[in-house]
Image: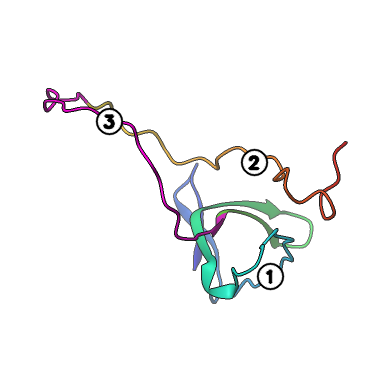
């Protein structure tokens, strides 16, 4: 890994790759008969920024991880529908860079675990 001075284009320092690990506990409402097989986790995006600390020649890394945790289960849906025809072409726009979705509110059915305000 090389750290570059973008103003001059020079290599400021070189280092071996750094492994970053972390552990985070999450409380979920998982009613019976659901279990571990119903939980899906994914990392949506990782944003990293570096800042050189001049007095001790170290680098301060800030890593933001956008993650998603889902509880999935089979459900039966009854949908009221009518016959329809295919729609026309849908124009698309220029994709925007990914951002973390807003934090969802706690589920109201878990009052023992997440009491209302």
Residue 104 drawn in magenta: no
Ranked by sequence position, the earlier of labels 3 and 2 is 3
Ranked by sequence position, the earlier of labels 2 and 1 is 1
Tell me the number on the disc at residue 81. Answer: 3
Q: Determine the residue positioned at 85% across, 39% down.
A: 116
Q: Marks 3 and 2, Cα distance to the nearest angstrom? A: 30 Å
Q: Disc 3 vs disc 1: which is toward the camera? A: 3
Q: Determine the residue positioned at 29% across, 29% down.
A: 94
Q: Disc 2 vs disc 1: which is toward the camera? A: 2
Q: Marks 2 and 1, Cα distance to the nearest angstrom? A: 22 Å
- The secondary element bearing badge 1 is classed as loop
Comparing 52 with 92, the one in front is 92
* Display coloring: rainbow
| Residue linked to disc 1 | 22
| Residue linked to disc 2 | 104
Mark 3 burial class by Cα count in 10 Å: few <14, some 14-19, many 20+:
few
- The secondary element bearing badge 3 is classed as loop
| Stretch in magenta | 68-91
Q: Are marks 3 and 2 in contact (CB under 8 Å)?
A: no
Comparing 106 with 65, the one in front is 106
Secondary structure of the magenta portion, mostly? loop
Mark 1 burial class by Cα count in 10 Å: few <14, some 14-19, many 20+:
few
Q: Determine the residue positioned at 85% across, 54% down.
A: 112
Q: Marks 3 and 1, Cα distance to the nearest angstrom? A: 47 Å
Left or right of 105, for residue 49? left
Q: Are marks 2 and 1 in contact (CB under 8 Å)?
A: no
Comparing 63 with 76, the one in front is 76
């Amino acid at each position: 890994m090389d750290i570059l001075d973008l103003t001059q284009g020079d290599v400021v320092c070189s280092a071996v790759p750094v492994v970053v690990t972390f552990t985070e506990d999450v409380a979920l409402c998982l009613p019976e008969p659901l279990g571990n097989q119903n939980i899906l986790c994914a990392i949506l995006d990782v944003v990293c920024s570096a800042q050189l600390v001049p007095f001790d020649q170290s680098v301060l890394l800030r890593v933001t991880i956008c993650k998603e945790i889902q509880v999935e289960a089979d459900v039966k849906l009854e949908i009221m529908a009518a016959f329809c025809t295919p729609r026309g072409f849908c124009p698309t726009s220029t994709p925007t860079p990914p951002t973390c979705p807003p934090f969802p509110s706690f589920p109201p059915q878990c009052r023992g675990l997440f009491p209302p305000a």
